[in-house]
Structures are given as C-alpha cells and as structure tokens.
Image (cartoon, rainbow, N blue to C red):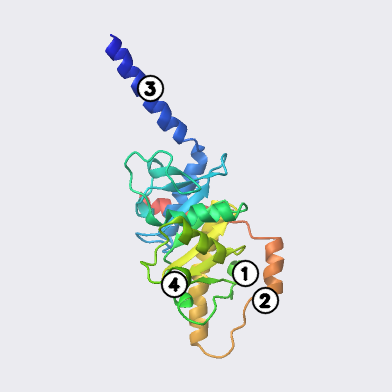
Amino acid sequence: MIRLIGAAAVGLLCWLSVAAAQTAPAAAVEELVLANRILNDRGVLDAYGHISIRHPTNPNRYLMARAIAPGLVTADDIMEFDLDSNPVDRRGRALFIERFIHGEVYKARPDVGSVIHTHSAGVIPFSVTATPLRPITHNASFLHVGVPVWEIRESFGTTKMLVNDGKIGQSLAATLGDKPVALMRGHGNVVVGPNVRVATARAVFTDENARMLAVALSLGGPVNYVSPGEGALRDKDPSDATRSWELWKANAMRKQQ
C-alpha cells in the first residue's frame, strides 16, 4: 500500500510539473498552430523556419513548436521557453537550433509579441545584392522604415550561417533594431509584430512585395516606390489583419482535411 501511494504521489508530481510548464491559454496555442499552417500554405515556410509568440501572461517566456515542419505543427508540439531559449519542460523533444532568434528579439523588443524566421525565397536575392528591399505595394508599406541586412560574417567570421547561440541572436536583434523586418544574408529573414496575426501578415506581404519588386526591377527604368509619407500614414492607421487571417485560416484548414 505504501509503495502504491508513493507511486501515485510521484505520478501526481510529474503531472503537476507538466501542467505548470504548459500555462498558456488554449486560444493562444491555437493561433500559434494556425500561424504555422498558414505560412506553410502560403509558401512562406516549407520544411524549415519557425514562429513564436510571447507568453500571454508571462512576458519573460515565449511559446514555439518543437523542431518539426511548420505544416505539421499541432497543439501537442507547442513548448514553453525562457528568454535565454531554455525549454521549461523539454521531455526529450527536439529543439530548433535557431530558437535564439526568438529569445534575443523578445529581450531587445518589449513591443514585440510574435517573431517569425523564414527562408522566404522572395527575400533572399535582396539579402545578397546591393538592391534594397523597399515597398512597392500598400500591403507592404510597413517596409518604408527600411529593411536592414544582417551579415553574420561581420562579427563571427566563417560559420554555418545559423543563429545557434545567444550572442549571435543578440547580433541579429541589434541589426533588426526597431524595424519590423531584417534580412539575413543568404539565409532568409526575421519578421516581428505586436501579435501573431500581424507578424504573419507581415511575413506574407514581405515575401509578396519582394517577388513583385524583383519583377518591377527586371522591367527596367525607375521604380515608383511607396513613399515614406504614405508609409507613415498607414503606420498611424494600420490595416486590420483579421480579414486576411480568416481567409488564410480557411484555406489552410481546408487543405488539411
């Protein structure tokens, strides 16, 4: 009997430990899962890349999936991390090597509620050439503040081009500064927003704008960009991401059925 009670107590403690680690509201987890599915469906993410949200009730933690392709993420895959990117309850699950992108951006940017890292094919040409990524469509007008390019070689020399520790993450966060998007030379980008819906929309529109700009540049002649004034006016009254989110959600969910 004593052994049974002891075993039950151990089991209860283990359950409580897991429950304590999984403190995020179900609605927040659901939106994070949907963001993964949406960005995969939109072609912004493939087998790689990742999305996180700042913990809704604890700003010193964030939520992100275990290392898994974004299009396969479920609620059971969501994990909790501190801002040093240590898992709260790992339970043997594989982790994204570049999770430090997220923790260091959250440390540097209290205004950020969601971080996305993509290998978006549209943006990479602008990370390896002298042509800046600038907005030509109103949906991407948030790019009017500039899109910096982070060069890992400047501070770290020859590497695997991965943000695999806190110091490298700090360098990337410093280049991002107060901007919504930064490019990573030959790698992809980091996109941030006040919440996951805005960050998701920015990731989609950044990729679409980059692809359209490449076409415009190929036509020759001067390009008529969104002006700083136009961008600033839209910053004061940004578009609601709800309509896009609901459509993208419906399309992603339909394809999963």
**Mark 2 → mark 1, Cα distance in angstroms:** 8 Å
Which tag, 2 or 1, sits closer to the chain's start? 1
Which badge, 2 or 3, comes first in the chain's sequence?
Answer: 3
The numbered disc on residue 227 is 2
Q: Which residue is mark 4?
A: 153
Query: x and y percent of residue 138 in the render?
Result: 62, 70
User: What type is the residue that disc 3 sits on?
Assistant: Leu
Please, which residue is most extreme toward the top here?
A: 1
245 relative to 164 in the view: left or right: right
Q: Of label 4 and label 2, which has the lower sequence position? A: 4
Residue at left offset 62%, top offset 82%: 224
Separation (CA) of disc 4 from disc 1 = 30 Å
Which residue in the structure is indicated by mark 1?
A: 141
Mark 3 or mark 1, which is nearer the start of the sequence?
3
Q: Residue at x 44, y 58 (%)?
A: 39
Label 4: few (<14), some (14–19) or many (≥20) C-alpha neighbours in 10 Å: few
Secondary structure found at label 1: helix
On the rendered structure, is 165 left or right of 194? left
The residue tagged 3 is 12
Residue 247 numbered tag: none
Q: Position of residue 129 (x, y in %)?
A: 47, 81
Specify few, some or many for label 3: CA neighbours under 10 Å numbering under 14, 14-19, or 20 or more: few
Measured Cα–Cα span from mark 4 to mark 3: 49 Å
Q: In the structure shown, which secondary structural element does the residue marked by tag 2 occupy?
A: loop
